[in-house]
Image (cartoon, helix red, strand yellow):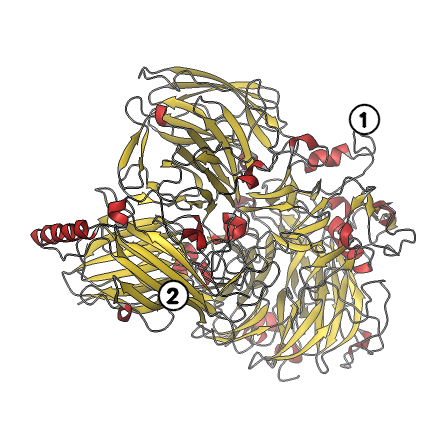
């Protein structure tokens, strides 16, 4: 058993393709940029956000959600989130949640994110079974050591916290580096890729999302992150004003003020293919000018849209069995 | 990147196919006419594939590149033994006619709209065996595509910019790849390849799918969703056929590495649906690594072609549920009369057996089934890599796994646990086929936690017999013929030391033919009908019987208990009734409710006329149906999914699905449920989670989830029986050969009764180890109803036994002989008092009528088979279709009308009560 920082190869350089101005801006350049953006933001009547923030994040994976009969799920918990040295940890739940924390980023940011493993039994190597948990992220840039996969896939390391598939490869924690490069704007899932097998435990609760906003993106009164699982929506709400995250759980009741602009972030998980509908609403299909009122979405696809909250409604999965099982939730507008 | 790893890998020799389309590199925008000659071929492993005329057939078929507005004339010559067509969903194609074996036909397609299209063989799902390819229609002018740079810039792509292209077809749970170099040369990459490129290469991917849907995900790369400005890294490919083309700059912003690509459906990830996009550092050769090939190292294959692949089609067809794509061919080649065949005389009757060599792969594709399945290991050579192979949830798709360790691998479907495929991975350096791991004395491991079981053991031989009887209809016990023959292949096998079952001269170093186990001309007689009549009629799901006017198997066979003859066969050809499995009836006994276990359908049948009332969509693989005694509402266990469907009494629409597990938890996949006599509880045996679930009917609360396997895995609880006062629950554990007894109120485990205590699995001897004064066993127990008077549990066991349990002591009283594949059991009233248990068998075509207490003294020691009834139709049988094969076979669900169980019997109309004694009319009071 060893306790080590496992990335000796990458201590000094991150990604050779990342441009210097984005990655390590000179102080003067950086300040100029900030001022420029501030002016730009104010002129657009938008809330300004500092350019190229550095995020230091720590997550823990835990067991949770005992069904009353000893069967458990797993969940990520936000331990800390520092942005350019300032903590924003109080935005997050203090306990592990399903879904995991939503990490809001801006194109140009960089992230160092560490995973810890508090799943019982994770320190002992078991032949043929990985006890690791990891963070595999979609959308943003990272090198092969931040893939969050097992060595049988990446040919380097078992990239997670805990005892991996490889003998004598135990990490008490694992750090990933993400370059939230230009061109990566969007909402993307992150999830475990290493628990038990190289497929991970994404369908057992170890999932969350990053929202990568373009520089100067508008803000919304509420943001809802909804994950479509095989028997329920797992969701959460982010308050646009104080950025607090709440209402974690299955088929949450979402609320909005009348006439406010709210943004839905859909991500599918598990095995089923879904058809999402927000009854009575239409929205712009992302990347197009088309108005739609439902969308087919398969595992790990994402679909982000904005509506003006006008009337109370409900969201539902039209998948044959899931609809009968009551895979739906309320959208209350008042 | 580790260069050594890559350069150290021996690349299989592959035939490079040169295929040039005139306009591929042309900058002119003139509409062209493409004349293409294709042939359809059968590959060495039995899969089908298209070939560009004169070249080797490939999967996917040759990629066709044309420009918008072009015309394509395809001349297709069919060199297979089946009808083949050519279809391009999304493009107009005047002719949908198929071409017969040995014939040639022309098809014309107008490439009227730019896009990527699937072309396929149009043969009702069988095209998933390999008759599919990509037709890529690019815009006549302008850039082909665009990609996102590391710095976010969007860069247009022309043909000249492309360093290489890959076609990846998602079929079943397998990727089939082709590489297209910048000069247009196409090279097959076969199954689950690792496509390669050098960092910063401009690479265009064409992802296509046919059959059940997928999502495609490539790690660390992102691209445009076609026709939008949306940047994505995962894309849905919808059911049916679908395509998605995109371009990336390899490793842009992320560097070199083995970047995994995979389907992101968990069920398909577990089924092996992945590979790696190998991005080499600048200066690398960017070579792709070819996957397992149908031309490769399998029995009768070409060792020099590297890793091979055998493919099983997953079907709804009796015995051939996992049918090797070359199963028919192997049966023919192994016939004693197959002069000149390399397998002449091997006498292989099963189509579910394959032989490959270490390092080759086995592939499954659910191309001929309407149900959902898992591909799950039942046994494997001790210590084998990649074992056990399994999927948590049943789903549509397939599976693929590489097998390195010599020995026998048996795969099953957890939902339909008589579906079997056997693969022998043979070490070519030893004499005979290896049944166990040569490194560990030819032993095997089982999914139930048994490790290092000698292949010479009686249990191993019993499992082998079960396999060869189950998967070959010729080995079934057909009472209409009067003789029973079972023939095992004459193939020599290597097993563990010492006795080979009852055979004396086995052992390490020896190879002996399996045919030593053959059964020859054993006389068969249906036997006498019971002397005492039953009450009413008995409906039997003869699930495998084949009829003329539908292609899916299965009928209901109605036995008149007054005459013990078959009065009706209900095939329902108009709905292609598919594997009818289990039944129940409504209060007035006028409607038979019928599940179709290999489908997503549930039908309602007029009991008196046998006519269809309604066929409705339900969840996948509905198994059992029971009504609520309190309301007559219908409950259906959705075996392939995670809940119970509820249909209100008197309606034909599903109202809701009651989940069998808490949200987000592993699917329970309930099979043969029961309901408490007061209608308050639904009790399910959960094959997905190896426990018994107890659920409140009124609000769906989960009251208990009780594991039934103790500390060993894979108990596979499959059916429930309950005491008439609901005080106890009985659950059979199919793979643990045991009966769990639970408290009917709390669901707590009271006791586990081993049904094989008297059996020595190593030497096959029997001894009264449980001290009940009888040699009695039940191997692979299935249905286990409790008699309506609460005295006995009758357990139908697939190995061919009927076990009688005394509920006063919850011990085994005796066991009676049953036919192979013994499966269903249910009680009905005996005329004048008492009950019969009606017991069905899958691989025999008669019904056993068991009297658990002939003299009515409450002592079950004299339990006896009162008689047998042939399930084959006769001159007096009414029917809606003509029986054409497997007459009376497939006995599974069985239902006696009137329904005389406590809770239900009280609701019978007077006309039905008249035939019952006062005790039978109210069994609880008289218990």
Which of A204/B440 is in front? B440
Which of B243/A194 is in front? A194
| Residue B695 as seen in the image, left or right of residue B427 | left
Q: Position of residue B665 (x, y in %)?
A: 47, 66
**Count of marks placed on residues:** 2
Residue placed under numbered mark 2 in the picture: A59
Measure how far apart labels 1 and 2 are at the Cα level: 67 Å
| Residue B705 as seen in the image, left or right of residue B867 | left
Mark 2 residue crowding within 10 angstroms, few (<14) / some (14–19) / many (20+): many
Mark 1 residue crowding within 10 angstroms, few (<14) / some (14–19) / many (20+): few
Asked if marks 1 and 2 fall on the same chain, the answer is: no
Residue contact between numbered discs 1 and 2, judged by CB atoms under 8 Å: no
Considering only vertical position in the picture, is B164 above or below B634? above
Residue placed under numbered mark 1 in the picture: B340
Residue A97 disc label: none
Q: Position of residue A310 (x, y in %)?
A: 16, 60
- The answer to whether any part of residue B152 appears in the image is yes
| Residue B570 as seen in the image, left or right of residue A103 | right
Looking at the figure, which quarter contains the C terminus of chain B? Answer: bottom right
Furthest-right residue in view? B504
Secondary-structure class at tag 2: strand
Q: Position of residue B622 (x, y in %)?
A: 54, 57
Which of B264/B286 is in front? B286
Tag 2, which chain?
Answer: A
Secondary-structure class at tag 1: loop
Furthest-left residue in view? A43
Residue located 86% across and 65% down the image: B765
User: Of circles 1 and 2, which is in front?
Assistant: 2
Q: Position of residue B346 (x, y in %)?
A: 81, 38
Tag 1, which chain?
Answer: B
- The answer to whether any part of residue A147 appears in the image is no
Which of B919/A239 is in front? A239
């Amino acid at each position: 058993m060893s306790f080590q920082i496992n990335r000796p190869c990458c201590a000094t350089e991150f990604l050779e393709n990342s441009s210097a101005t984005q990655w390590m801006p000179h102080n003067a350049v950086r300040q100029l940029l900030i001022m420029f953006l501030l002016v730009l933001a104010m002129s657009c009547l938008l809330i300004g956000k500092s350019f190229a923030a550095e995020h230091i994040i720590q997550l823990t994976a835990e067991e949770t959600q005992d069904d009353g009969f000893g069967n458990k799920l797993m969940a990520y918990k936000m331990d800390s989130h520092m942005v350019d040295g300032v903590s924003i940890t109080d935005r997050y739940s203090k306990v592990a949640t399903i879904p995991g924390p939503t990490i809001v980023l801006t194109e140009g940011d960089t992230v160092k994110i560490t995973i810890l493993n508090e799943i019982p039994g994770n320190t002992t190597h078991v032949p043929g079974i990985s006890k690791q948990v990891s963070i595999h992220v979609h959308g943003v840039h990272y090198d092969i050591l931040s893939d969050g996969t097992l060595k049988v896939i990446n040919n380097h390391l078992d990239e997670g916290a805990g005892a991996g598939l490889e003998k004598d490869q135990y990490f008490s924690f694992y750090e990933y580096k993400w370059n939230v490069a230009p061109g990566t704007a969007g909402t993307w899932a992150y999830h475990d890729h290493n628990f038990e097998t190289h497929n991970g435990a994404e369908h057992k609760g170890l999932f969350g999302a990053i929202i990568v906003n373009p520089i100067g993106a508008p803000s919304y009164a509420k943001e809802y992150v909804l994950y479509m699982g095989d028997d329920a929506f797992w969701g959460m709400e982010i308050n646009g004003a104080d950025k607090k995250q709440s209402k974690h759980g299955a088929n949450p009741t979402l609320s909005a003020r009348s006439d406010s602009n709210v943004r839905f972030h859909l991500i599918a998980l598990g095995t089923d293919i879904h058809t999402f509908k927000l009854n009575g609403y239409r929205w712009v299909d992302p990347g197009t000018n088309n108005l739609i009122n439902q969308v087919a979405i398969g595992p790990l696809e994402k679909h982000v849209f904005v509506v003006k909250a006008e009337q109370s409604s409900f969201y539902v999965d039209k998948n044959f069995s899931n609809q009968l099982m009551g895979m739906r939730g309320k959208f209350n507008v008042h | 990147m580790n260069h050594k790893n890559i350069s150290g890998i021996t690349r299989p020799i592959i035939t490079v196919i040169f295929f040039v389309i005139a306009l591929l590199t042309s900058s002119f925008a003139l509409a062209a006419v493409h004349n293409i000659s294709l042939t359809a071929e059968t590959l060495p492993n039995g899969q089908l594939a298209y070939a560009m005329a004169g070249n080797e057939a490939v999967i996917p078929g040759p990629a066709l590149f044309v420009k918008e507005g072009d015309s394509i004339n395809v001349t297709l010559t069919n060199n297979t033994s089946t009808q083949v067509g050519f279809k391009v969903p999304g493009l107009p194609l005047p002719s949908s006619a198929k071409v017969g074996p040995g014939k040639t036909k022309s098809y014309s397609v107008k490439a009227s709209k730019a896009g990527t299209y699937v072309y396929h063989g149009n043969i009702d799902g069988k095209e998933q065996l390999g008759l599919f390819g990509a037709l890529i229609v690019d815009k006549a002018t302008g850039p082909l595509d665009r990609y996102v740079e590391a710095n976010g810039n969007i860069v247009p792509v022309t043909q000249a910019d492309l360093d290489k292209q890959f076609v990846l077809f998602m079929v079943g749970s397998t990727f089939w790849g082709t590489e297209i170099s910048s000069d247009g040369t196409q090279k097959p990459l076969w199954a689950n390849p690792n496509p390669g490129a050098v960092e910063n290469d401009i690479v265009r991917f064409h992802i296509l799918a046919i059959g059940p849907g997928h999502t495609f995900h490539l790690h660390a790369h992102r691209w445009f969703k076609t026709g939008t400005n949306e940047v994505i890294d995962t894309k849905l490919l919808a059911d049916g056929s679908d395509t998605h083309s995109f371009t990336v700059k390899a490793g842009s912003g992320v560097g070199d590495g083995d970047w995994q690509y995979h389907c992101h459906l968990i069920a398909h990830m577990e089924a092996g649906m992945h590979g790696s996009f190998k991005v080499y550092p600048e200066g690398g050769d960017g070579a792709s690594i070819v996957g397992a090939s149908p031309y490769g190292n399998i029995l009768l294959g070409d060792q020099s072609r590297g890793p091979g692949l055998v493919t099983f089609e997953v079907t709804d067809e009796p015995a051939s549920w996992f049918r090797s794509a070359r199963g028919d061919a192997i049966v023919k080649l192994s016939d004693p009369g197959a002069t000149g065949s390399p397998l002449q005389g091997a006498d292989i009757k099963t189509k579910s057996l394959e032989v490959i060599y270490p390092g080759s792969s086995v592939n499954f594709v659910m191309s001929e089934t309407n149900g959902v399945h898992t591909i799950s290991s039942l046994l494997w050579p001790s210590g084998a890599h990649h074992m056990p192979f399994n999927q948590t949830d049943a789903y549509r798709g397939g599976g693929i796994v590489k097998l390195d360790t010599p020995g026998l691998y048996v795969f099953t479907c957890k939902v339909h646990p008589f579906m079997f495929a056997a693969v022998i991975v043979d070490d070519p350096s030893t004499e005979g086929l290896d049944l166990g791991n040569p490194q560990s004395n030819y032993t095997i491991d089982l999914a139930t936690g048994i490790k290092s079981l000698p292949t010479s053991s009686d249990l191993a031989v019993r499992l082998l017999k079960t396999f060869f009887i189950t998967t070959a209809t010729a080995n079934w016990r057909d009472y209409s013929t009067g003789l029973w023959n079972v023939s095992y292949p004459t193939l020599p096998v290597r097993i563990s030391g010492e006795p080979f079952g009852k055979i004396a001269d086995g052992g390490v170093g020896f190879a002996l033919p399996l045919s030593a186990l053959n059964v020859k001309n054993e006389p068969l007689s249906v036997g006498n009908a019971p002397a005492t009549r039953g009450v009413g009629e008995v409906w039997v799901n003869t699930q495998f019987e084949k009829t003329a006017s539908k292609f899916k198997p299965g009928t209901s066979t109605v036995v008149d208990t007054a005459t013990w003859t078959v009065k009706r066969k209900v095939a329902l050809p108009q709905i292609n009734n598919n594997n009818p499995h289990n039944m129940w009836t409504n209060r007035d006994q006028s409607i038979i409710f019928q599940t179709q276990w290999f489908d997503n359908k549930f039908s309602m049948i007029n009991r008196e006329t046998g006519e269809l009332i309604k066929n409705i969509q339900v969840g996948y693989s509905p198994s059992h149906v029971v009504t609520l005694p309190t309301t007559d509402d219908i409950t259906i266990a959705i075996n392939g999914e995670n809940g119970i469907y509820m249909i209100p009494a008197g309606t034909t629409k599903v109202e809701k699905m009651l989940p069998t597990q808490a949200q987000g938890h592993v699917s329970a996949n309930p099979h043969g449920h029961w309901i408490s006599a007061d209608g308050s509880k639904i009790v399910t045996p959960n094959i997905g989670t190896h426990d018994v679930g107890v659920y409140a009917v009124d609000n769906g609360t989960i009251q208990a989830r009780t594991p039934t396997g103790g500390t060993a895995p894979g108990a596979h609880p499959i059916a429930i029986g309950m005491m008439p006062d609901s005080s106890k629950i009985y659950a059979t554990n199919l793979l643990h050969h045991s009966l769990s007894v639970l408290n009917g109120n709390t669901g707590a485990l009271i006791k586990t009764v081993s049904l094989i205590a008297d059996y020595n699995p190593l030497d096959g001897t029997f001894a009264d180890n449980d001290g009940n004064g009888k040699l009695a066993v039940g191997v692979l127990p299935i249905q286990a109803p409790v008699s309506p008077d609460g005295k006995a549990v009758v357990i139908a066991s697939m190995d061919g036994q009927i076990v009688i349990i005394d509920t006063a002591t919850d011990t085994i009283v005796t066991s009676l002989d049953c036919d192979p594949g013994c499966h269903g059991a249910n009680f009905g009233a005996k005329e004048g008092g008492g009950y019969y248990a009606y017991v069905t068998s899958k691989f025999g075509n008669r019904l056993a009528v068991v009297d658990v207490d002939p003299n009515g003294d409450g002592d079950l020691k004299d339990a006896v088979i009162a008689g047998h009834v042939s399930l084959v139709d006769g001159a007096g049988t009414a029917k809606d279709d003509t029986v054409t094969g497997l007459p009376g076979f497939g006995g599974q669900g069985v239902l006696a009308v009137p329904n005389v169980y406590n809770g239900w019997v009280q609701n019978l109309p007077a006309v039905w009560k008249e035939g019952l004694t006062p005790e039978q009319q109210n069994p609880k009071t008289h218990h």
